[in-house]
Image (tube, grey):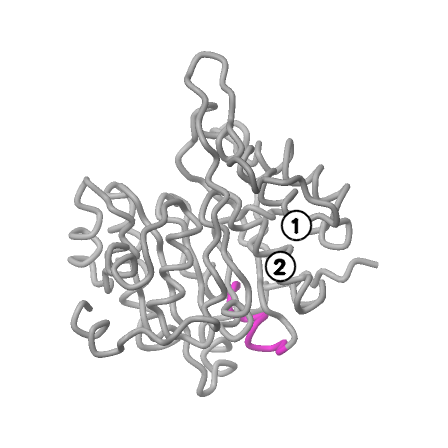
Amino acid sequence: MSAIKTFDPTRWTLASAIAAKGERTISVCIPCRNEAGTVGDLVRMIEPTLLGTLIDELIVLDDDSSDGTGEIAAEAGATVIPVDYVHFFHGVERGKGNALWASLLVSSGDIVVWIDGDITSFTTEWIIRLVMPLLIDDELGLVKANYERPSHLGGGGRTTELVARPLLSMYFPEIADIQQPLAGEFAGRRTMLEAIPFATGWGVEIGMLIDMAAKFGPESLGQVDLGVRLHRHHKLETLAIQAAEVAATLLMRVAQPPSFAEAIPMLHRKTLDPMQLNIASRPPINSLPKMSQPLLDERK
């Protein structure tokens, strides 16, 4: 029997989530890089109904956008934090995982929900469904979204099915029942999230699952159905980078990992120059000195 907890959200409502929340606080973080076409709609859906009721802060972490993403998000009602603010205190890194780590660092909720900035099928029910397992089960540290990705509308999940799931099945079968291990929609408990490192590149989600299970047990992981997910379709060249970084991040966590100490692994491509993989890591936040709260308030 799988240790991964799967939740049925059909009876959960906003009212039941607010009642279960009690005195705990909830942050929603949207890490974005050049998502001007979608981030405003996301914020405008969340802000009027959930901010001040179920959630206590709505943060867009602007990862060096050049298309006005930050301005659009701020006008829609989000608190926008530039990634350079975190870089000023903790040094410069790059990648999706770096943006997730930065958003955890600048948020304050007891529970943190992440939503990808390019989603076009989002509903506020997603946030209710992601936080409820953490509100009713204190053992959980991380809850991943489960959903359908219709193939006739662009599909998705190729990196999951061709790389993540086979490698999890071979090396970490105890958590291989997670249906969407690379889902960008997930929620976690701050005290447990701050105890694990974050891979800075595309391997961040697979690394979080493995590290959470290693530190707190597979029973600290859960998943919940969100229905259908639609988002921007990535080109094959981008997926190749994602796949390589996911594989490298996972393999660095096996019992006898390959050695990347002497040289950062390179991705050799058919028609493009080789490129270095982003396999760096941010340390557990609970190992860092606290950031200056007055400075953070000033930037907000």
Foreground: 192 or 185?
192
Q: Determine whether label 1 and label 2 are within 8 Å by CB.
A: yes
Which residue occupies 49% across, 56% down? 198
Alpha carbon separation for disc pair 1 and 2? 8 Å
Mark 2 residue element: helix
Q: Residue at x 72, y 54 (%)?
A: 175
Query: Mark 1 falls on what kind of element?
Result: loop
Q: Position of residue 207 (x, y in %)?
A: 58, 52
Magenta span: chief secondary structure: helix
Q: Which residue in the structure is indicated by mark 1?
A: 253
- Can you name the residue that lies furthest to the right here? 1
| Residue of label 2 | 211
The image shows residue 10, relative to residue 274, as above or below, that is below
Amino acid carrying mark 2 in the image: Asp
Residue 53: quarter of image: bottom left
Q: Residues within 10 Å of mark 1 (few under 14, many from 20)?
A: some
* Magenta stretch: includes residue 64: no
